[in-house]
Amino acid sequence: MTQLAEQLRAMEEEERELQFDRFENETALALGLAVIEEAKRLDKRITVEIYREGQRLFAHAMTGTSAENENWIRRKNNVVNHFGQSSWHVALRVRDEGKTLEADYGLPLADYVGAGGGFPLVLRGTGPIGTITVSGLPDQEDHDLLIAALRAFINRERELDQSGVRA
């Protein structure tokens, strides 16, 4: 199996694994802050936005980012919403197939971008409910930062639920 095929398989596993048991407005706030803390820990500067059912629940632009990051987020979100997969997963798969979003899928570059950093918010037992997206770093770094923050956040939430601290 090629390195790219392994990476695509790993992304499919991330999308199956990183699902929420519940997702409320307060969840978006805590998650957004967790992503910002991960960026600070890594000494990176990002913009992050979280949407649920079309409503923006969280947005923050760290010092050193620009309004252009918001446009990248919008375009990445469109990819996540269209395909139901992370924007980096879609970008790598489409490239591997020798296709483009514009020519082969009819998705204009002004509104869609194959770039890392967008991820579907999936409620276990319900399905996709929104997106979380970061912008400001190279593709793989945007993706990796987001996945690390999501994984840590979801694991922490599940531990709280299992310990009975939150009932």
Image: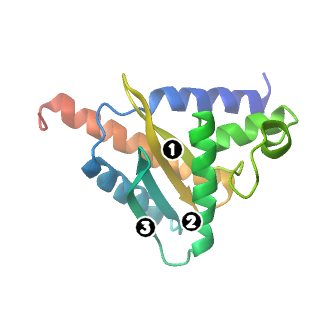
Tell which circle, 3 or 2, labels the residue nearer the N-terminal end: 3
Which residue in the structure is indicated by mark 3?
A: 60
User: Could you classify mark 3 by the number of other residues whose Cα lies within 10 Å: few (under 14), some (14-19), or many (20 or more)?
Assistant: some
The circle drawn on residue 70 is 2
* Frontmost residue, 150 versus 77: 77
Residue 147 location in percent, x, y? 51, 44
The Cα–Cα distance between marks 3 and 2, rounded to whole angstroms, is 10 Å
Q: Quadrant of residue 82?
A: top right
Q: Is residue 60 above or below residue 5?
A: below
Residue 2 visible in the shown view:
yes
User: Could you classify mark 2 by the number of other residues whose Cα lies within 10 Å: few (under 14), some (14-19), or many (20 or more)?
Assistant: many
Tell which circle, 1 or 2, labels the residue nearer the N-terminal end: 2
Kindly report which numbered mark, 3 or 1, lies closer to the viewer in this rendering. Answer: 3
Whether residue 99 sits left or right of residue 122 in the image: it is right
The residue located at (68%, 54%) in the rendering is: 111
Secondary structure of residue under mark 3? strand
The Cα–Cα distance between marks 1 and 2, rounded to whole angstroms, is 19 Å
* Frontmost residue, 29 versus 164: 29
Secondary structure of residue under mark 2? helix
Question: Could you tell me the amino acid type at mark 1?
Answer: Ile
Which residue in the structure is indicated by mark 1?
A: 147
Tell which circle, 3 or 1, labels the residue nearer the N-terminal end: 3
Kindly report which numbered mark, 3 or 2, lies closer to the viewer in this rendering. Answer: 2
The residue located at (38%, 25%) in the rendering is: 126
